[in-house]
Each structure stands twice: as C-alpha cells, then as structure tokens.
Image (cartoon, coloured by chain):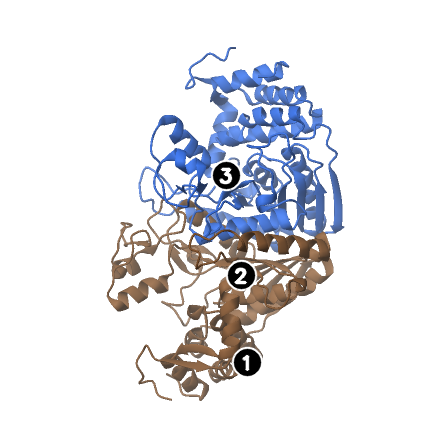
Chain colours: A brown, B blue
Amino acid sequence: MTDERDKHDTATVAREELLRLAEAALTAAGASPRHAALSADILVEGDLMGLGTHGVLRVLLYSERLRLGGIAADAEITVERKTPSLALVDGGNGLGPAVAMAGLDAGFEMAAESGLAYVGCRNSNHLGALAPYALKACEKGLVLLCGTNASTTIAPWGGREARLGNNPLCIAAPCPPSAGDGAPHFILDMAMSVAARGKIRKARDEGTAIPEGWAVDAAGRPTSDPVAALEGFLLPFGGHKGSGLSQAVDLLSGVLTGARFLTDISPWTDYPERACGTGHFFLLLDPARLLGAEQYAAAVERFRRLIRETPPADPAQPVQIPGEREQLRRAEALEKGIVLPAGLLAKIEALASGNPL
Amino acid sequence: MTDERDKHDTATVAREELLRLAEAALTAAGASPRHAALSADILVEGDLMGLGTHGVLRVLLYSERLRLGGIAADAEITVERKTPSLALVDGGNGLGPAVAMAGLDAGFEMAAESGLAYVGCRNSNHLGALAPYALKACEKGLVLLCGTNASTTIAPWGGREARLGNNPLCIAAPCPPSAGDGAPHFILDMAMSVAARGKIRKARDEGTAIPEGWAVDAAGRPTSDPVAALEGFLLPFGGHKGSGLSQAVDLLSGVLTGARFLTDISPWTDYPERACGTGHFFLLLDPARLLGAEQYAAAVERFRRLIRETPPADPAQPVQIPGEREQLRRAEALEKGIVLPAGLLAKIEALASGNPL
C-alpha cells in the first residue's frame, strides 16, 4: 500500500491483522514483545469501540517516542503491595498500556482476595482510552473506577493559564451474565473539556469556526477561531464543576500514586523525547462479595432497564446507557472489520515493515 | 422570638446554640437523642459552610417526616462487614445523617485496618450536604469519595422523563497538618444539574426568568419560565456527561448498596409519610498507608500551591481549590456566629420548645 490515497479514503482491516501490525510496529521501534502486545491490544480495542483518537493512531506517536528514548523500550515495571487492598506500580517510563495493564492485573488479584483494591501507577505515559480497561474489568464481573492525568490544556476555573490536564475519568459496572450475551455493561468514560482538542484541530484543518464555549484564546477571552483556541486553552465542562473534577482525577492518579501532576507532567507534544511522568489509578470492587451475585444481578438489570426504557426525546433515538454505543460499534467491528483512514493504515504497515516514516 | 419578621431579616446564632436547638427540635419530633445529635451536627456544619439549602432548614422537613412516620424515630442501624474492606449499613429508615455517620464511622475503622474501605448504606433518607462528611474524613487524614442518590428531577440524556436524581458526588483529599492551621482541604462537592432546583424556586418566587440551559418543561422543550421548569425537569451539567455521572453515582450509592435507585426512590416532596429508601456510599483511602505520610504531604502541598498560584482571570479573585470558600466561611461563622433567616430560626426555636409549626 502507498500513502498517496485521498485523506478521506478508508480501509477495512480485521482485528487480528491490526493487532499484528500494531505489535510489529511497536517492536520495530524497540518495544519488548510483551509490552508491544499489551499496547496493541488496548489501542485496537479503542478502534473497535470507535474511539479513533485513542486507537492505533497512537502507534505513530508511541513509535516516535520509543525511537527518541522518550518512552523506555526496555522498561522494568514493578508492583509493590502496601496492604491487601493497596498497591503502587512503578512503570519505569514504559509504554502506558503496559504499565496500566500491570496495574489492572494487580488490582484483579487483590480484588479477588479482599473484594476491594486501589492500584496507583506512576512513571507512565499515555495509556490509550480508559474504556478498554473498563471492559476487561466488567468481563471479570468487577466494578471499576479509573482515571489518568495528562499534560495541561485547561485553566482552573477563574484562572487564565493552563494548569489542568483534560484528565479522563471512567466509572464502570458489569452487566451480569444472566442478562444474556451482548447486554451492554455500564461504561462511562469522559474527559473534562466541553469539546476534545482533536475537534478544534479538525476545525482548523477544515477552516471552520468552533462554537463559543469550547475554548478561550491565550489571553483568556472567549473565541470561535480554532487557531486562537489552540494557542489558548480548553474550557472545562460545567465550568467550576469540570475544573474541580479534573483536579480530583489528578489527585487520585497523580498525587496519590507518586506520579507527576498538573504542570509537572512533561507534554509529549513539545518534548516527545522526554519522560512524561504520567499517573493512573484503578479502583476495583467485587459486587458479588459486597451484595451477593444474585442481588447485584437483579439490581443492575433493573437499573439498566429503567434507563433504557426512558421515553426518548426523539423516537428514533432510544435512550442508551453510557458505553452502550461503543459496545455496539465493537460488536459490529469484530464482525465486519475495523474501518480506518487508509493513510493511517499505510503508515502502520510501513512501521511494521521496519520503515520509519 | 416571633415569626413576624420580614423574610429578609437575619439572625446570628452561635454554633453551640444552633446545635442545641436543632437537636431539641428533632428529639421533640421523636428522634432518639443520639440520632438527633448526629443529625444536628451535620446540618449545622452545612450552615457553617454557607450551604444553607442543606443546613438546619432541613430540621423542618426531618421533623415533619418524623411526626408522620416517614422517617423512623426509633430506627435500629446495623453494620455488616463483608470483607476487611467492604461493609453494608442498613439504616432502618432512620434519619439520614445518623445512618450516614454509622457508615462513615465503620469506614474509618476499616480504613485504619486495611488502608481502604467501601461502605454502602441503604434504607436511609436525606443526609444533608456531603462536604461535612468530607471534612471529618480530611481531619482524620483520609481521602474520601462519597455520594448519595435522590428522588428524580433529571432526564437521562436523550430522554424526556425525569428518571435520575440530582445525585451529588464528593471527592476530598486532606491537607496535611504540616501545611499549618487553616490550610484548606480539597473538598469537591457537586450535584449533577446545571443549576440547583432551589435557584429555580427562588426565580419563581421573585417573578424573574431563568437562563436557558437550566431546565426544560414537561414536554422536554427548553424554557426560561421558572414555573414551567418546575413542572418539567432539570438539565444535567455537561449534557451526556452529567447525565452519565448521575447514573454512576446512583450505581455506587443505590445499586451496590442494596438501596432503592432511580425512580424507585420515594420522593419526600410528594410522600413525606413514606420511607424514601435512599442509598449512600463512602469510599475511604489512607494516603499515609499508600504513599507514606511525608511523600503525600509534600505532593498535596505542591498540588495546592500550583492551583492557587494560577494567574487569575480577575486579579481581585484569586484561584481557589474546591471547598476553600466553604472552609473560609466556616472559620468566619465559628468566630462570628451563623447568619440565618430570622424566620427560620424562630421556627426551629418553636420546634425545640415542643410547639409543632
């Protein structure tokens, strides 16, 4: 394949093939086979769920940073148990999904013992989307709260300087097996800005204005100019509420884990060759140990039904639970293949063949 | 005192005196001295922090419901440990703050043992504001996540029927003693609507319009008419994000605890004589056990400084951390007394003297 195709061209690829390509691209950049496989899995899950900004697109960035030494190719990841319910992971500046999966796996072990676990990860990097981790927890029947910090793009409420990351928070609750195959888990995965930075980049590239309320310019004034917005900063959703929630996620994923936080996180956009120092957290709870499996199953099924049977504002758009749309997309992509921009697939194929871009 | 004063008249009362009055009013309505004292403490804390809608104003409602049998005056509250880190509280339909404090106290014991605890409360009622519980956790050096469900006032995103409560979520992290007296703890306490229902009631009473975006009418159409808004429902902050977060809080405080949730919660506004079936959760983490006291102290102090030293948009309004304003108000009210509407104080005095309103 070539890189010449129109940027709106798409290509369809099966999950297994995309996994192989993403893994080969990352190992070609120096990552260990195990870390490459863990990272490919999480990124391909992002594409399966339709979260393209957090899918294999990130293989390009991860590969560049591995080559520059910004991400450690030979990272040693260590897990330290503090109590039966508390652990810390030192990611050794490895690939974010490999560090995060070490944390999630430690959390699975601990939750199996005590029913409740918090694992904090430090010395990590971008970990992909949170929803793929949530799906793994739900498939084990566990409730999950997780989050990560990120380099700064948002001003604290009342401030005029970006000191907050667009730190996503994910809260997930499993749908029990008794609900039948394909019944969606509850997976809320949300970042803290009104609109994602990627949408503003897209408006810039297409030469269109952005709605007011998405961002302010470098002087803190409201703007609908995407260029001015990218030089300024994003606005948090709900004003002081989103600003506070972003800080809370950073406390749980940065302060509590021994990671960097707020403006101390090194931005990969400006310094791809430096360690980011990102932190993540995973909080797992076993509802069967708390409430009993049967009572939990009955309650969560009733909850799901009450939400989905809400009379819709638009009769053509039934009310869904958070994450339902992504799980429907995933089922479709597993069957029909993953649709990617053709140029992106070509780049990953080139990297997988050992040809740097 | 009489009830004749202008509704804008205020009265100033010392914390100890207001505690005595609130406790006497609740015992006069039948509550046990212990449950009355726990409830008075939480409600007076609400007033100290300037959260008047969740202060002793609620003594009127709690008293009415105690008299009507909607809240059980002689409630037995039981705590059942499931694992060293998990417990469930059955509130026996008692006063919400008494049930919640049984949960928080159980959480304190468990966090002291294992460093991490989740306690779920069911068969409860309105528990006051969350910030007072957070302050107690912070004073013990513990990180707290807590929340409660509530009767429905919000439509799920894309729906046109109220099926979600305005379920508040609180995330708090203690400022270490080394930061000195009066250094604020991080206490984020937020509900899920763009604007509180109380603000819409105020607009109705004053005959003013409300901003679009606060609420929709009974048919789901945007409205700036407060009367139509009160017949319709509140809009969640951040659209689908606030809607999802409200559901997540209900999963943690309703589904996981064995409480009622969503539309199953009985609204005290319509049926003060019935049990609400409200649920709450408290998740506690000891940062000293996870990270070590010194490392946590250094990190959280740096975090606080980075936020508060953000250049402000308005030089007269320094950037504050969440909960800082409430803690400043509390310090002032402890020194100078609590300012209440004079008519409200007169009503509580009447109840405390054994005279139903």
Question: On residue A32, which mark appears?
Answer: 1
Q: Earlier in the sequence, mark 2 or mark 1?
A: 1
Chain letter of disc 1 in the image: A
Q: Residue at x 47, y 22 (%)?
A: B339
Left or right for A285, reference A265: right
* Distance (Cα) linking label 2 and label 3: 27 Å
Mark 2 residue element: strand
Residue flagged by tag 2: what amino acid is it?
Answer: His
Question: On residue A280, which mark appears?
Answer: 2
* Distance (Cα) linking label 3 and label 1: 46 Å
Do circles 2 and 3 both sit on a common chain?
no
Q: Residue at x 62, y 24 (%)?
A: B63
Residue flagged by tag 3: what amino acid is it?
Answer: Ala
Q: Which residue is mark 3?
A: B183
Residue flagged by tag 1: what amino acid is it?
Answer: Ser
Chain letter of disc 3 in the image: B
In this view, the residue in front, B4 or B204, is: B204
Q: Residues within 10 Å of mark 1 (few under 14, many from 20)?
A: some
Do circles 2 and 1 both sit on a common chain?
yes
